[in-house]
Amino acid sequence: GRGMQALGITPQNCKTLEEAHGIAASLVHTQAAPQRQLALLFAFVDVPRRLHLPIAQRWEAAGWPPLAQHASYAAHVLMVELFFQISLAAKLIAAERASNRADIAYLFYVPFCNVFVSSDKLHRRCAKPFLTKQQDFVWGQDLKADLCRINEVFATATEAERQKGLHKLASRPPGGLNDLVVYLWERHGMAPLSAANPESAVPAESHDKLLAHLLDYQDAPTAPEVASLHSDE
């Protein structure tokens, strides 16, 4: 935080978390000064020194494109780190709370999810600038409450209905689009499992051969040395 203050980040010129995110994003998307981007990456991500030269050579060979274009996930991690330090300098995030440093690292997972669920107040404030229009932030307590509602609905099922199996009893969440889980289910295109036909994915003959091959391991005296196997095997 003090380092960012020395660079001119203050509560006066960075007043919101969205502005902090914008500054961080500009630093990884710019095409100017790639060597400075490289230095930021090495410093913040703690890249081992032995990898500095090959990373720099590979980036140079690509023509020094913006980091966000050349190495998108590395750029995302760096952007989260920069966002945190900028927000500390601008006093948008409390420096006194030690757990904030660990909690902000959960934003590293954002590119890999449709729905980011948390009951952490820091996440509630900071996650949204990192989410695309196709992603949702869900407050954990809201999700728990709606899951309890769903549980109560299915708890009224008769024994005969339960005997049909979970996939028939609960092929989709009950309720309407005003209910959180139903909204998320519909928005993110989750189809009931009954709509898929896994048996059709593999021909019967191939399925039998695969099963026989896997069963051979039951009689094997030791497990195969995975490290010695070719990747195709």
Image (cartoon, grey):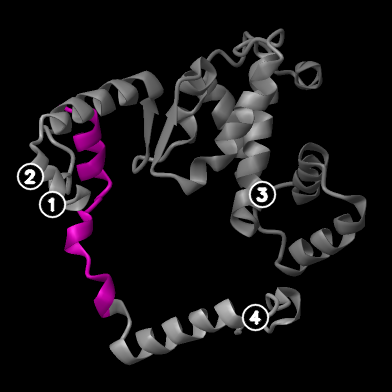
**SS of the residue under disc 4:** loop
Q: Tell me which corner region of the image, top left, top right, bottom left or bottom right, holds residue 43.
A: top right
Q: Residue at x 36, y 84 (%)?
A: 207
**How far across and how far down the image is residue 36, in percent?**
79, 43
Give me the C-alpha separation between circle 2 and circle 1: 7 Å
| Any part of residue 27 in sight | no
Q: CA distance from mark 2 to mark 4?
A: 48 Å
Q: Quarter of the image containing the C terminus?
A: bottom right
| Residue for badge 2 | 160
Q: Earlier in the sequence, mark 3 or mark 2?
A: 3
Q: Earlier in the sequence, mark 2 or mark 4?
A: 2
Q: Which residues are magenta?
A: 178-200
Q: Which residue is mark 4?
A: 231
Q: Amino acid at mark 1?
A: Lys
Label 3 and label 2: CA atoms lie apart by 53 Å
Q: Where in the figure is residue 178, as x and y percent of width and height?
A: 15, 27
Identify the amino acid type marked 2. Ala
Dot 3: element: helix
Q: Are marks 3 and 1 in contact (CB under 8 Å)?
A: no
- What number is the disc on residue 128? none
**Which class describes the residues within 10 Å of circle 4: few (<14), some (14-19), or many (20+)?**
few
* Of pointers 3 and 4, the one earlier in the residue sequence: 3
Q: Nearer the viewer, mark 1 or mark 4?
A: 1
Distance between mark 3 and mark 1 Cα atoms: 48 Å
Q: Report the disc number at residue 164.
A: 1
67 relative to 149, above or below: below
Q: In the image, what residue type sits under mark 4?
A: Ser
- How far apart are labels 1 and 4 at the CA level? 42 Å
Instruction: Return the residue at label 3.
Output: 74
Q: Residue at x 9, y 44 (%)?
A: 161
Pointers 2 and 1 in contact (C-beta within 8 Å): yes
Q: Is residue 223 visible?
A: yes
